[in-house]
Image (spheres, rainbow, N blue to C red):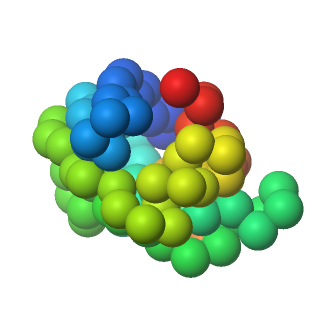
């Protein structure tokens, strides 16, 4: 059985630091979280924000990045990671594209 997949669409406004997003997860696994991580090299480090929480299959919203988070976004040091009941320690780490 294939693992669940998160589809994420987003925009980032460099002038305001606002990141807007729409997320949908498809597949058989129960979502624990979809997190934005600060990267430590190529490895996920601290969680910057949660885009989804346990049990959600869709989410949309916005968050304002400030200080170090905004600097990390501009430098390409933020990534997404999906956590599910099948992969409670997280799946693949996907770097957020630099705007």
Query: Residue 30's x, y, as percent?
Result: 35, 54
Q: Quadrant of the N terminus?
A: top right
Residue for point 51% across, 67% down? 68
- Is residue 27 visible from the viewing direction of this image? no
Q: Nearer the viewer, residue 57 or 67?
A: 67
Classify residue 57 as left or right of residue 49: left
Number of labelled discs?
A: 0
Q: Is residue 21 above or below residue 72?
A: above
Classify residue 6 as left or right of residue 89: left
- Is residue 70 visible from the viewing direction of this image? yes
Query: Residue 71's x, y, as percent?
Result: 55, 55
Query: Residue 89's x, y, as percent?
Result: 61, 71
Q: Nearer the viewer, residue 21 or 77?
A: 77
Residue for point 58% across, 42% down? 74
Q: Is residue 97 above or below residue 95?
A: above
Classify residue 35 as left or right of residue 96: left
Q: Nearer the viewer, residue 57 or 95?
A: 95
In the displayed orientation, state which residue is furthest to the right. 41
Quadrant in which residue 28 is drawn: top left
Q: Is residue 43 above or below residue 2?
A: below
Quadrant in which residue 95 is drawn: top right
Residue for point 34% across, 56% down? 65
Q: Is residue 54 above or below residue 65?
A: below
In the displayed orientation, state which residue is furthest to the bottom. 46
């Amino acid at each position: 059985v294939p693992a669940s997949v998160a589809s994420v669409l987003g925009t980032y406004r460099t002038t305001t630091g606002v990141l807007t997003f729409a997320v949908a997860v498809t597949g058989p696994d129960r979502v624990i979280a979809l997190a934005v991580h600060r990267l430590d090299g190529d490895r996920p480090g601290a969680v910057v924000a949660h885009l989804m929480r346990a049990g959600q299959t869709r989410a949309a919203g916005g968050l304002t990045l400030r200080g170090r988070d905004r600097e990390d976004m501009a430098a390409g040091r933020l990534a997404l990671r999906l956590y599910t009941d099948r992969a409670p320690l997280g799946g693949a780490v996907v770097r957020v594209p630099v705007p």
